[in-house]
Image (spheres, rainbow, N blue to C red):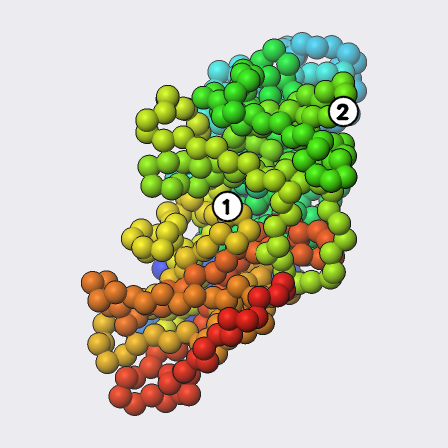
Amino acid sequence: MCHRDGMEVGFSGELGNYSWHVCVVDVSGEEIISCNHTVDYERLLLSVLFVNCTSLEHGQHQLRLRLMVNDTVGEEKNVTYSTHCDSVREDEIITPFSAGATNCTKDFMAVTFSRLIPSFGDEHMVPAAPMTWTLSIDDGTRIHQLSLEQAMQQGYNFLLDGHNLTVQVAFTATGVVSYKHNDKVLHTVALKFTYGPPEHRLSVESRMLCAPGPAICNATHVTVAIPAFPGTLMAVGVEDKTIPMDQLQENGIALDTKRGVKLHISRGVLKSRLHGESCSGPQSYMSSLKLAFQFHGETVTMVMHPECPCDQHTPIAAVCTQDGYMDFEILADSTTPLLDLDTLRLRDPACRPAFKSSLNDRVWFHVPLNGCGTRYWFDGEKIVYENEVRALWADFPLRRISRDSELRLTVLCSFSNGDASLTIRVDNLPPLASSVNQGPLSLVLLSYPEGSYRQPYRDDQYPIVRYLRQPIFLEVQVLNRNDPNLHLVLDDCWATASQDPSSLPQWNIVVDGCEYDLDSYRTVFHPVGHGVSYANYRQRLEVKTFVFVSGDKALPGLVYFHCSGLICDRFQPDSLLCMTRCPKPSRSKRGNI
């Protein structure tokens, strides 16, 4: 791979099975001592500078290598290789102006080279003769050399605006490399754009990245998912603000890098807009999400514009409408003294009453079932929707978590099979990776939608949305064990506000194999039936939903659960935890934590 001031050379993966060494040599085979090069033996990659390491021959930087390999019988083999990169001609100018970030849209990716073309003035057409236009695209296996006309026929478009050049690249264009996982895709292309008369040629380069989405939205978060590729996320920017990587959580963004890159962005970070004629309801969106990656030795930035589907409905005055709304009214005389209707809020405080009477004695809410914080769950063959109406929060004492409801009024509506047809699309966030510890003992932590523990949540249903005090059914399993004399015993289980099990804040749900006695809503242990395979290698528990709080505000982001366990011999227990006898819980303790 050729760069401006040097090159990288990759070696065959077979070298990983041998002891080997490489050095840079001259045309006579002598090692060049002055050559400053580095070797990454894990990645099988050699990096050199053109200066002192190559010789300029026929307009090319020629590199010669001597590879020394010790085979399995101890014999050393020496092989000499040569490779080259095209040199920049003396009359060729490398622009001092770097390309901007990749503008990533759902249809194409684009990059703009600012102040690049002073000689064209304000022309808006691409001139042909006498200019020589060339586009070079490196797809990692070969370099495609295309004329301007060929490039435009193969997915590239060039726009001139004054002194600025914008290159638009279709995702199917020649040389575009795509990384895919399930329905997620990332496109990348490395291009070199050369133009100018032969006596004064100018070249610019850019590596582009684009994950066209779409974003995945649910009631609490918007998720941007990027499949795994050889890049490392280095920086995140929201609108005009750059957020340090160690401050993402407190800014409402949870980062998951176990399977590619996933950003779970709290709805509170997003903006809302009305489309007018095309959409009668609000749409959540982010005007700019900038992600910078370290990719092939350089920083590559793309700008995304994630948005959620428009909440489009036709208002119909009804208690629970078939087109997906919940309508209700609140009277001022609901309380004594009279309720100040201006203080009423839904779960999403940005949503306000649709109507207020001139006498200020009542308000009417028109709430979308897939917006304003409305939540849902399944009750048999019925789907139940729920929202909350409350006044402004009073000051609460400082605490670590809260299960206290902020309700002033709970509003419910439901649909069953006997009701008229209701078409609702529910988008779930992508999965959080199961907690797996590699080694002699491998555990997996699963979550189930109900206490029957019939089928765990699928990967595409995470993160799970729950309202306060609703049960969360968890199961810890031991993998790859079948000895009937061994059994699983839980040690500790706890929750955190980030993926790091040691991060703060934390809340215990199981301590030394028993329920946490400082929690008013104790963890419930459920027996594993004998009809379940390897029941001795499973532990089931139920936790009431809570949120981490700071002062009178809930902390943004997700809640993560972690567990540790032991494998015990039924006949020869080697730990006190294997013989745990938990004290009976006190029924009198019911205060708030």
Say left or right for 14 vs 529: right
- Looking at the rendered structure, which numbered label has been put on residue 557? none
Residue 76 in percent (x, y) is at: 38, 71
| Viewer-proximal residue among 455 and 98 | 455
Q: Which residue is mark 1?
A: 465
| Viewer-proximal residue among 171 and 348 | 348
Q: CA distance from mark 2 to mark 1?
A: 35 Å
Q: Which residue is mark 2?
A: 360
Residue 319 in percent (x, y) is at: 52, 25
| Viewer-proximal residue among 230 and 504 | 504
Residue ID at (76%, 32%): 342
Quadrant for residue 71, please give it.
bottom left
Residue ID at (73%, 40%): 336
Q: Is residue 561 above or below residue 426?
A: below
Badge 2, how many Cα within 10 Å: few under 14, some, many 20+? few
Label 1 sits on what residue type?
A: Val
Label 2 sits on what residue type?
A: Asn
Residue 327 in percent (x, y) is at: 56, 25
